[in-house]
Image (tube, helix red, strand yellow):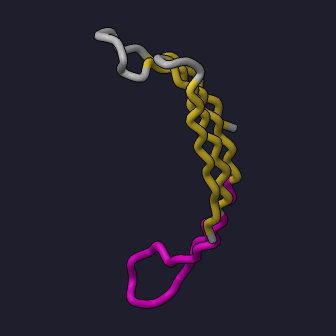
């Protein structure tokens, strides 16, 4: 199973600077069973289980293109 949510906010701070915030959360779970020997009969199997819960946050300050000089600065966190 996989479920996730993402939210994005663009907030103009001045006429030429914008703050962007992107927040996301994903939840992934998998139980997969497979036979690995390659022979025509089942002589063994392997179970692969995965569980991941991921939160991420990105913050960006950027110019909005009103000037001849464009710039961007930001930070990213993921756990």
The answer to which of 49 and 46 lies nearer the viewer is 49
User: Residue at (59%, 21%) from the top-left corner?
Assistant: 13
User: Residue at (64%, 39%) from the top-left corner?
Assistant: 56
Q: Is residue 49 visible?
A: no
**Residue 35 shown left or right of residue 71 in the figure:** right
The answer to which of 62 and 15 lies nearer the viewer is 15
User: Residue at (63%, 47%) from the top-left corner?
Assistant: 24
User: Residue at (50%, 87%) from the top-left corner?
Assistant: 42
Image quarter for residue 30? bottom right
Q: Quadrant of the N terminus?
A: bottom right
Q: Position of residue 77 (x, y in %)?
A: 64, 30
Residue at the farthest left position: 68
The answer to which of 4 and 73 lies nearer the viewer is 73
Image quarter for residue 11? top right
Q: Is residue 59 above or below residue 10?
A: above
Q: Position of residue 58 (x, y in %)?
A: 59, 32
Q: Position of residue 59 (x, y in %)?
A: 60, 27
Q: Is residue 69 visible?
A: yes
78 in the magenta segment: no
Q: Is residue 43 above or below residue 51?
A: below
Which stretch appears magenta?
29-52
Q: Quadrant of the C terminus?
A: top right
The answer to which of 64 and 52 lies nearer the viewer is 64
51 in the magenta segment: yes
Number of numbered labels in the structure image: 0
Residue at the farthest bottom position: 41
């Amino acid at each position: 199973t996989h479920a996730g949510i993402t939210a994005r906010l663009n907030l103009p701070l001045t006429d030429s600077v914008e703050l962007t915030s992107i927040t996301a959360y994903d939840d992934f779970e998998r139980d997969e069973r497979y036979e690995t020997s390659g022979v025509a009969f089942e002589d063994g199997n392997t179970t692969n289980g995965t569980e991941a819960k991921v939160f991420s946050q990105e913050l960006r300050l950027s110019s909005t293109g009103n000037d001849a000089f464009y710039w961007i600065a930001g930070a990213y966190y993921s756990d």
